[in-house]
Amino acid sequence: MQDNNKWQLILASASPRRKELLGYTKLNFQIITKSIDEVSHQTDPRLFALDVAKKKGEAVAQGLIPSRQVVISADTVVALHGKLFGKPSDENEARRFLLELSGKVHEVHTAVVLHVYFKHKWHAIEHVETTHVEFLKIDPRLLEDYLASGDSLDKAGGYGIQGQAQTFIKSLNGSYSNVVGFPLSVFCEMMASQFIHLIEEKGPWQNLF
């Protein structure tokens, strides 16, 4: 039975990577997802990610019986010179993405939105984290081996940093977990500062959950 004085943490994502990262906080949380079209009128990659993340969280929040809740939503996009790379539709598109990123430095943007129900309404706390990732010029054999693994199909830009793609990832500048899909330290900072300030509390935010 839930303590009515405790806050409830809800992850609005079915991503196993985000579930694992949030689990490192050692807090209890629920996973609730709603299917949305991950599209936006925004053309700037950072604003695109933020818009989609907000829509994911709003869709979940609207289906809840409001109480002391924090709904966490996120969206990750890859960008090169302003061009946005989402999740490839098939292996051929993944190949095109990776060949375009080959030998270059690109950006990974992850938007994190906290929808907080407080004083009878929802409040949004937003942040977009950016990490720069450099690819080697991808060896054709390594490229085909990676595509054959199937790892590219559910990931922005057609690759996941934590897997076989490390055969051609040269370096990164910024948060590693951001590239995985959830900038964990950023989330903790958002909770410790903006969330605590919003709900007019003091002390460790973890004690509220």
Image (spheres, rainbow, N blue to C red):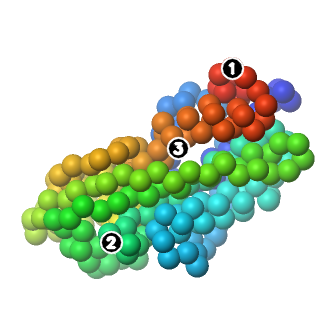
**Visible in this render: residue 182?**
yes
Label 1 amino acid? Gly
Q: Which residue is mark 2?
A: 81
Which residue is depicted at the point 51% across and 54% down? 128
Quadrant assignment for the N terminus: top right
Mark 1 neighbour density, 10 Å: few (under 14) some (14–19) many (20 or more): few
Label 2 amino acid? His
Pick whichever of labels 1 and 3 is earlier in the sequence.
3
Q: Secondary structure at mark 1?
A: loop
Q: Position of residue 73 (x, y in %)?
A: 61, 53
Which residue is depicted at the point 66% across and 38% down? 194
Q: Nearer the viewer, residue 100 or 17?
A: 100
Q: CA distance from mark 3 to mark 2?
A: 30 Å
137 with respect to 177 (left or right): left
Q: Nearer the viewer, residue 77 or 146?
A: 77
Tags 3 and 2 touching, CB below 8 Å: no
Q: CA distance from mark 1 to mark 3?
A: 25 Å
Q: Position of residue 81 (x, y in %)?
A: 32, 72
Q: Which residue is mark 3?
A: 19
Tags 1 and 3 touching, CB below 8 Å: no
Question: Label for residue 203?
Answer: 1
**Visible in this render: residue 1?**
no
Which residue is depicted at the point 24% across and 74% down? 100
Label 3 amino acid? Lys
Mark 3 neighbour density, 10 Å: few (under 14) some (14–19) many (20 or more): some
Q: Secondary structure at mark 2?
A: loop
